[in-house]
Image (cartoon, helix red, strand yellow):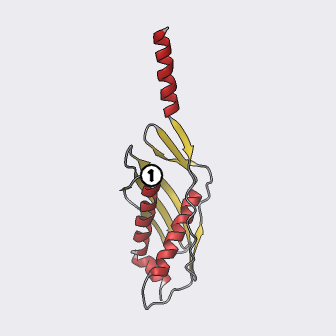
Amino acid sequence: MKKTIIACMLGITVLSGCTTVYQEAPKNESYSSEPVTFVNAQIDTTPRVFFSDGITTLKTGYKGWVDNIISNLSMKINNVETNRTLESASFEISLHAIQCTGHYVPECNMTVYLTDNENYKKVFTSGEVNSYPVQNSMNKAINVTTDKIMADNEFLQLIYK
């Protein structure tokens, strides 16, 4: 009887420790970088797993994260000090993958697709960045990815005269 109770207690402890949670992207302040516009081209709305450490699994919708990427990129465009003038340009952004792993300090990697639907089509990846908690790691991945976009000469030639 004692062994059965101990086995039941262990089973309950293990089952209660393994959870799947839906986590929305944070709602950041929205920025505009007129005349350069960005369209959220994320078509899938089904939540996908983006983090698992063997105990907790987190799912998220990618559309909210794309909004954060657009906001971050627009803010960076507005903060660039240059003598050149912004050109009218429109881009579509979608998020192809978010992969976060790690038990104590999550490492995240994201892959972003940016296109103007004409000649410019590029994929940008953040590479593995880490921070704690996973939310901070995701924000870091967004910053690294948007920094890479802002360092792309072809992109800069399209948005500046």
Decide which of 107, 152 is in the foreground and name it.
Answer: 107
Name the residue: 46% across, 76% down. Answer: 76
Q: Residue lying furthest bottom in this view? A: 83
User: For the residue labelled by badge 1, is the local secondary structure a helix, a strand or a loop?
Assistant: helix
Q: Is residue 160 above or below residue 20?
A: below
Q: Position of residue 63 (x, y in %)?
A: 59, 59
Residue 109, image quadrant: bottom left
Decide which of 46, 155 is in the foreground and name it.
Answer: 46
Name the residue: 54% across, 66% down. Answer: 93
Position of 152 with respect to 20 (left or right) is left
Callout 1: few (<14), some (14-19), or many (20+) C-alpha neighbours within 10 Å? many
Name the residue: 56% across, 69% down. Answer: 29
Residue under numbered circle 1:
134
Position of 103 with respect to 67 (left or right) is left
Decide which of 76, 15 is in the foreground and name it.
Answer: 15
Q: Position of residue 154 (x, y in %)?
A: 43, 78
Q: Is residue 29 above or below residue 103?
A: below
Position of 129 with respect to 29 (left or right) is left
Which three-letter amino acid code belongs to the residue tagged 1?
Answer: Val
